[in-house]
Image: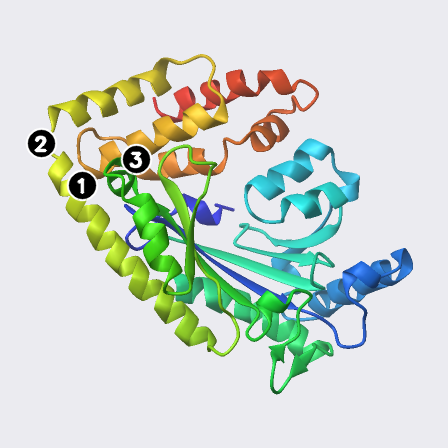
Amino acid sequence: MAKWYNGGGADNDVVLFSKIRLARNLNDTPFKSRMSREIKKNTVKKLYASVKNSELAGDFNLIDLSALSDIEAVSYAEKQLISPEFAKEKGAFLLSSNEDVSVMLCEEDHIRITAFAGGLATEEAYALANKTDDVFIRNLPVAYDERLGFLTASPINLGTGLKVSVALHLPAIKSNGGAARLAAMVGKLGLSLRSLYGDKGAFYLLSNQISMGISEKAAIDNINAVTAQIIRQERNLRDVMKNSEVWEDKLYRSLGTLKMARRLDFGEAAQLLSDVRLGISLSIYDENLFSVDYLIHNLADGTVLSGSKSSDAPELASKIRADKIREKLK
């Protein structure tokens, strides 16, 4: 089955994907920090059974990280399906067949649902997460307080337990020195803007910081409204680049490097793919945007090595990565 990141989406020249996370806990079970090994094991079984015995039974597989290599576990974290800490712990999680929904079982919270949709599609991602959330709420005693909302391990997630995020590609804003100003501006609106790949390329994640005293709809609407403004700003700045020979030269050089390089570390690959993505949006050359997004999502070290069956030789990652890029950008 095709993965969720193979298909574009609305405004995907600027928005790579939308992401929803819901945090839930059981009211008859201690938080993870106070769990014994036996309680954790039984809780995971209970959570899995609630899905297995529901209408979603055929939609998910149980992934037991303890049965996988460290590299394979890291790969799931690189794709944002689980947290890096959870990959180290080698816990168990549920994963849909096209990887658009994952559910960490007994991470910081008992239930951490994450859902993705391509482009600006926060409502679609929320619908996916909410469908899974409904199964847990119907079948299990989910912790909820009339005043505080859903009870979570961290007070910052109290209320809706909802985190809404959109991944943005902002090369024009970044090149104009506007990323820091934008982060400061959205911070005043209760949002955060951070680099998505360690400041390699121009990829950013915009997220809400407040989940209490605000409805799910209001949180999603806020993100959508701010994202729409950022999209307009980015596109306006890109229009200025269209007739620039300097930018045309730079972007052609980046594409040429990707098509010829025999070794690339992830940071360099992310920067070059960011340039190519910009070149496509400016119609400088005719490459496939979906192919570029596929590469961005699948080129971190763990994913490259786990997919190549060369996890015993991490030094090969840069070579395998370059090979995959050349194959995809023929």
Q: Is residue 195 visible?
A: yes
Q: Quadrant of residue 155?
A: bottom right
Q: Nearer the viewer, residue 152 or 314?
A: 152
**Disc 2 marks which residue?**
243
Q: Residues within 10 Å of mark 3 (few under 14, many from 20)?
A: many
Residue sitting at 61 percent across and 26 percent down? 305
Residue sitting at 68 percent across and 46 percent down? 85
Q: Secondary structure at mark 2?
A: loop
Q: Secondary structure at mark 1?
A: helix
Q: Residues within 10 Å of mark 2 (few under 14, many from 20)?
A: few
Q: Is residue 45 visible?
A: no
- Sequence-earlier tag: 2 or 3: 2
- Sequence-earlier tag: 3 or 1: 1
Q: Is residue 137 above or below residue 15?
A: below
**Disc 3 marks which residue?**
277
Residue sitting at 35 percent across and 26 percent down? 272
**What distance separates the C-alpha of mark 2 from that of mark 3?**
17 Å
Name the kind of residue labelled 2 in the image.
Asn
Lateral position of residue 302 relative to residue 19, left or right: right
Numbered badge on residue 175: none
Q: Is residue 176 above or below residue 245?
A: below
Name the kind of residue labelled 1 in the image.
Arg
Numbered badge on residue 238: 1
